[in-house]
Image: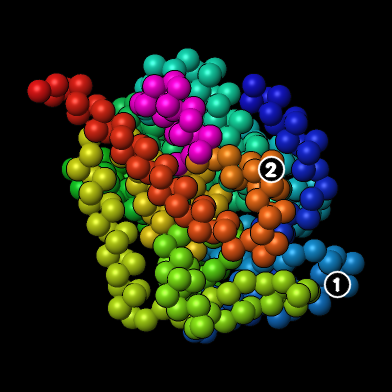
Amino acid sequence: MIAVSALWSLFRYRGTSSPDLMATWLAGHFYGLGQFDQVYPSDLSFYTMNAPSGWWPYLQSLGYSDSVFPFIYPPIWAAMMAQIARLISFDQLQFAVQIVNPVLLGLTIVLAARIIRTRIPAWAFLAIGLAILHFTLFGIAALAEDQPQILVSFLIILGIERQVSGRPWQAGAVMALAAAIKLYPLFFALIWVLRRQYKPALVFVLVGGILAATSVAVAGWPLHQAFLNEVRVIGATAFSNKFVFSIDPMIARIFMPDQLTFIPATGDVRIGWEGMEKTALWRWASLAALLISVFACARIRSPMAWPILAVLIGLFSPLSWGYHYITAVAFAPALLSILGHRAGILVLLAIFMPFSEAGYGLVSALSSDEPWLPTVGTIAMAALGLAFGAGVLAAKGKKHPN
């Protein structure tokens, strides 16, 4: 089933512009040229999602006219991409990623089923999960843009599965690798600390420290300062885009719409997104919400704690694209065993149908500016978290019938 979905995905997305993968490629290109000021964007007060100044002229010289996004990963990956770019072309890299990514999506679903230990047959769990990810925006956008988030989601769930399977050393190392790509897997590792599962937590710290030290040794401290500054700016931003599903931009759209600044897209000023700088109190409240989420989920002994945490991290993070929820969505087929087949199917349809191509097309035809999508997306992900929470309550009810 995974092989068939991979072939179908390759046929469907072959030749897309892949702006997210392109960002990593361009960061490596300019790193290889020694133009380190062109690796990261130079946002100051809030995140604009604009690429460094030299990227667009370079792309235009190549005849490229599609979207371009910035690179916001640790410097070690720009240094690594600089070496890869010397060996293969971008088209060759894109082809390899378009083969690997759908396979990783399928394996992520399989691992989620192993963590939950659901009574649903493995083939059914996988079929439902593949259908959700391949036919809704959560997977479509990630596959079309060759998003590294697919790899990160796979590594997070692999790390969790390794710990559940009694392989704590592997769990910590895998989670550290995920955190070396995107920082937020740190919150998943914090669960181990709070649960006093010290082996995976210790390995996470050791491997993470080695990766961080290697990154500084390879790329130098100035680039890490630029990276950490961009992370700080993202944390200080309420960024509103039609595919960003989180609480911060919803608050900004509802209560402070006049403070949102329109940011035109590079290469096409007719389209864009909006952003604003968060107050210090707002920033601290967001961080507090994330930490409270971790502490609360650490107290949940059910395996459902993991997808619940994935949803909460997405909701309370300042920049949560729809595909950031892949980690949680991979567990969605478990709702059929949690809620019963009939209720589970109805809940899945209610949550994911608006993001299917048919549902999205229908609503978009009725709403030209699409103000509904980020709001509905945020509510839908909150509903998914609540549905997982119902699984925790159901399990408690079975243990304590009185």
Camera-near label (2 vs 1) is 2
Q: Is the magenta stretch mostly helix, strand or loop?
A: helix
Q: Name the residue type under label 1.
A: Gln
Q: Tell me the residue at 49%/83% (across/down).
A: 259
- From this viewpoint, which residue is outermost toward the left? 402
Q: In which quarter of the image is residue 392?
A: top left
Residue in front for this viewpoint, 354 or 145? 354
Q: Tell me the residue at 32%/66% (across/down).
A: 287
Gap in angstroms between the C-alphas marked 2 and 1 = 31 Å
Which residues, given as a range, are shown in magenta? 328-350
Q: What element carries label 1?
A: helix
- From this viewpoint, which residue is outermost toward the front? 366
Q: Is mark 2 on a helix, strand or loop?
A: helix
The residue labelled by disc 2 is 357
Q: Residue 352, image x and y in percent?
A: 54, 40
Left or right of 115 in this view: 323: right
What is the total number of numbered labels drawn onto the structure image?
Answer: 2
The residue labelled by disc 1 is 60
Q: Tell me the residue at 47%/68% (across/down).
A: 249
